[in-house]
Amino acid sequence: MLHRLNAAGLGTIADKLDAGQRLSFADGVQLFECSDLWAVGFLANREREKRHAGRTYYNFNIRLEATNVCVASCLFCSFARLRPGDAGSYTMSLEQAWDKLRERAHQPLTEIHVVNGLHPDLPFDYYLEMLRGFKRIRPGIHLKCFTAVEIAFFADLYKMTDEQVLRELQAAGLDSLPGGGAEIFAERVRRKICHDKCGAGRYLAIHKLAHGLGMRTNVTMLYGHIETKEERVDHMIRARELQDDSGGFQAFIPLAFHPDNNQMRKLPAPSATDTLRVHAVSRLMLDNIPHVKAFWIATGVEVAQVSLWFGVDDLDGTVQEERIYHMAGARTPEAMSTTAIRKLIRAAGRDPIERDTLYNIVTGPESPDEAPALLQ
Ligand code: V47
């Protein structure tokens, strides 16, 4: 392999990794330019195994998108509808949102992941009550809700500071923030694809505030549209810098762009090899973020499975009721049973571990695969 790494021009990067040194911006760009994807994957896998050996995490979770009414006009989005009453728009009542959890009383869920459109008319109480209701129905459930973009929107709409919004939501039961809304941090790209929502600086500042309040968060990167390889690396480095500072990111999640039914539909979807490379480079650049997640809904199940040898150690989870990607043309199922997830991890030669949101182990690798399907 040494010969192959040298032939691929990756000898110096391999040496740096061996010495525990951090990769530079130029190293990141080189990893994107290297024609030998296998060599890049080999290095990413080495880093993955140093941290996690064969362990591969997943979560028994559920998605909720309580409204798709959204004042932002992101070019990549197929989910949003501008105004209440527009064709295809919906807003759940609190009872309808709570029903999503009540209906799953039989499932051993540990997390509910909530992402919404930026609705201009709902009161702040709607969100606070939603969280309180979830905790009343299921006190032990972890509430991973509202992207930094939603937090910024609430602060502007309800005339509060970002910190006040976070504190009030936390008091109502919020446990952590998902990573959505990061897209690509570079200003050039944001101006073109998501000019009217919170910028990169505020996204990162809100994550820092959340970390300061004791919350864990994730960070995503939407790739495969108009961004350059330099902008991908810049994005990773900005996430890495914040992590050095506040330390609360748990997972980095590259999100593959899906082109159906949105304003960027002329662009092709990213290839499987690009997806493998993005996850691998993420593992190599983000030396201080513990987990790299392949969101199987976005990557496709098969590519997610292969990515377990390209730096990935986390597959999100059962998901259930995902809408954002399915409205953008995702052909993946809308849910996967824990049995199916464990099987696909084992078939890849890795060890499945069910985790909760904070990566505490729920079910170890020793649990028999023959267990009956938990998801119905
Ligand atoms: O911010 C929207 C992306 C994100 C499209 O934190 C699209 O554990 C591709 O953030 N094609 C929301 N992507 C989803 C998200 C997420 C997913 C999985 C896990 C976690 C986590 C967070 O979805 C948005 C945007 O970047 N998105 N439309 C599209 N057409």
Image (tube, rainbow, N blue to C red):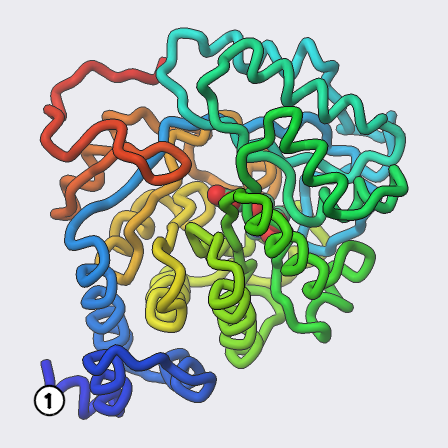
Q: Crowdedness of circle 1 by 10 Å Cα count: few (<14), some, many (20+)? A: few
Quadrant into which the C terminus falls: top left
Task: Judge whether residue 273 can be spotted in this image.
Answer: no
Whole-percent x, y for residue 297 in the image:
44, 41
Vertical side of 366 occupied by 210: above or below: below
- Residue 89 in which image quadrant: top right
Name which residue lies at 63% across and 60% down.
Answer: 204
Q: Is residue 173 left or right of residue 356?
A: right
Residue drawn where x is 65% and y is 28% of the image: 171
Percent across and percent down for residue 58 are: 32, 37
Closer-to-camera residue (203/80): 203
> Residue 176: in sight, yes or no?
yes
Return the x and y of residue 82 as percentages of the image width and height: 84, 39
Q: Quadrant of residue 150?
A: top right
Residue 80 in the figure: left or right of residue 141? right
Give the quadrant of the N terminus. bottom left
Ligand 1: does it lie within 8 Å of the C-beta at label 1? no
Viewer-nearest residue: 286 or 248: 248
Q: In x, y percent, where is residue 255? A: 50, 54
348 lies left or right of 27: left
Identify the residue at image location x=10%, y=31%.
Answer: 366
Read off the residue under disc 1: 3
Q: Secondary structure at mark 1?
A: helix
At a point 68% along the width and 26% down the height, the residue shown is 66
Amino acid bearing label 1: His
